[in-house]
Image (cartoon, rainbow, N blue to C red):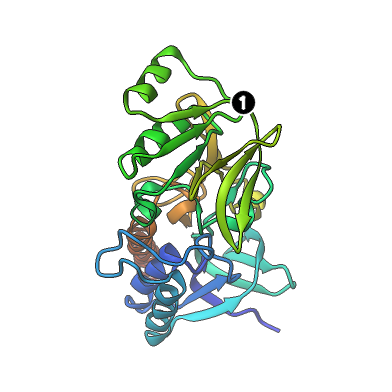
């Protein structure tokens, strides 16, 4: 049976993927969006800092986006992409063995937040275990906030949340501070607790405190942590496309696919946008990057079609 060929396959149906798909279908491109139904922000109740959509549940934004893309003829498939191979066109393979083909690929598969191995963190992630003051800070203002140190960036994170509450405690969890950092924290009255964190305490589904090795519990209403931001890009290995480690303050915090200003990767015809290229991007940023990449793909296809038309005319 012949495999259907599309102009573009979009891998990932979040904000970046749907935004790119929308730009393409409105340019009368045939587009297939493949998504596994597991967006990074699924645990979060609401999206914030998205103008006109502040406070909207992520699932609602994606449902509206899918409806808009489908309204212009875009198609959807549910599944997990396991490989992308290049021949005369690109072949995309899913975990169930299904294959699709396309002239161009837009990767918007996002990332996975890898949390420290502390019991209780994963269950509360996106609720009262948080990472971003811009995403969730308003919702925990004036509460007792803890910051679990996982890298040198924890001091900066504590200072950010100090803007939102007078009661902020930094749990060092085995990390060390410079003399300057100790002074900075003291100047803004940010408490510091040494020693390892053993687990977080939860009562009736709500975080109530942080338990240290030895049993002491520090009451907290919310806990922030910087997760490792690992791109969902293993399926690109057959293309020879690898991710690059990202550093901040001398510490690796994740990895990402490198792209140029248009969103094109080192592999011609493969573009990428969203958290898979920019882990810190919020939903509104990802949507903008998806639009830019979608427009660039349409331009790339037009250039190819023009070359082919000229060649045909010359013959």
Identify the residue at image location x=53%, y=44%.
Answer: 219
Residue farthest along the left direction in this orientation:
52
Please say whether residue 236 is visible from this viewpoint.
no
Residue 285 visible to the viewer? yes
- Residue receiving disc 1: 174
Q: Between residue 273 and residue 24, name the one nearer to us.
A: 273
- Above/below status of 53 relative to 231: below
Q: The C terminus appears in which quarter of the rendering?
A: bottom left
| Residue 228, x across and y down, in percent | 57, 42
Query: On the rendered structure, is 94 left or right of 307?
Result: right
Residue 2 in the image, given as x and y percentages of width and height:
66, 82
SS at badge 1: loop
Question: For this view, does 57 lie left or right of residue 26?
Answer: right
The answer to whether residue 93 is left or right of residue 301 is right
Is the residue marked by circle 1 packed among few (<14), some (14-19), or many (20+) residues within 10 Å?
few
Q: Name the residue located 31 percent from the left edge and 66 percent from the top edge.
A: 54
Residue nearest the observer in this picture, 122 or 90: 122
Q: Is residue 237 left or right of residue 6?
A: right
Rendered-image quadrant of the N terminus: bottom right
- What is the x, y in percent for residue 174? 62, 26
The residue positioned farthest toward the top in the image shown: 179
């Amino acid at each position: 049976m012949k495999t259907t060929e599309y102009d573009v396959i979009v891998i990932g149906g979040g904000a970046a993927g749907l935004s790119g798909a929308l730009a393409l279908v409105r340019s009368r491109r045939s587009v297939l969006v493949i998504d596994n139904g597991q967006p990074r922000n699924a645990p979060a109740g609401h999206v914030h800092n998205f103008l006109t959509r502040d406070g909207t549940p992520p699932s609602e934004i994606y449902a509206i986006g899918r409806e808009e893309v489908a309204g212009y003829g875009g198609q959807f498939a549910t599944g997990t992409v396991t490989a992308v191979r290049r021949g005369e066109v690109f072949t995309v393979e899913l975990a169930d063995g299904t294959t699709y083909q396309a002239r161009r690929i837009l990767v918007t598969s996002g990332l996975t937040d890898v949390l420290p191995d502390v019991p209780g963190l994963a269950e509360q992630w996106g609720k009262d275990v948080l990472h971003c003051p811009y995403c969730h800070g308003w919702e925990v203002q004036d509460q007792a906030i803890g910051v679990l140190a996982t890298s040198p960036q924890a001091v900066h994170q504590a200072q950010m949340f100090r803007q939102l509450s007078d009661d902020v405690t930094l749990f060092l969890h085995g990390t060390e501070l410079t003399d300057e950092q100790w002074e900075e924290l003291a100047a803004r009255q940010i408490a510091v607790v040494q020693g390892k964190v053993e687990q977080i305490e939860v009562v009736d589904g709500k975080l109530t405190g942080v338990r240290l090795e030895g049993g002491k519990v520090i009451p907290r209403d919310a806990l922030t942590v910087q997760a490792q931001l690992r791109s969902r890009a293993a399926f690109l290995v057959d293309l020879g496309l690898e991710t690059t480690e990202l550093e901040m303050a001398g510490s690796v915090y994740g990895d990402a696919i490198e792209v140029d200003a248009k969103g094109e990767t080192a592999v011609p015809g493969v573009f990428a946008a969203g958290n898979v290229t920019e882990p810190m991007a919020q939903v509104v940023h990802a949507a903008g990057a998806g639009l830019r990449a979608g427009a660039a793909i349409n331009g790339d296809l037009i250039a190819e079609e023009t070359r082919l038309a000229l060649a045909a005319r010359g013959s």
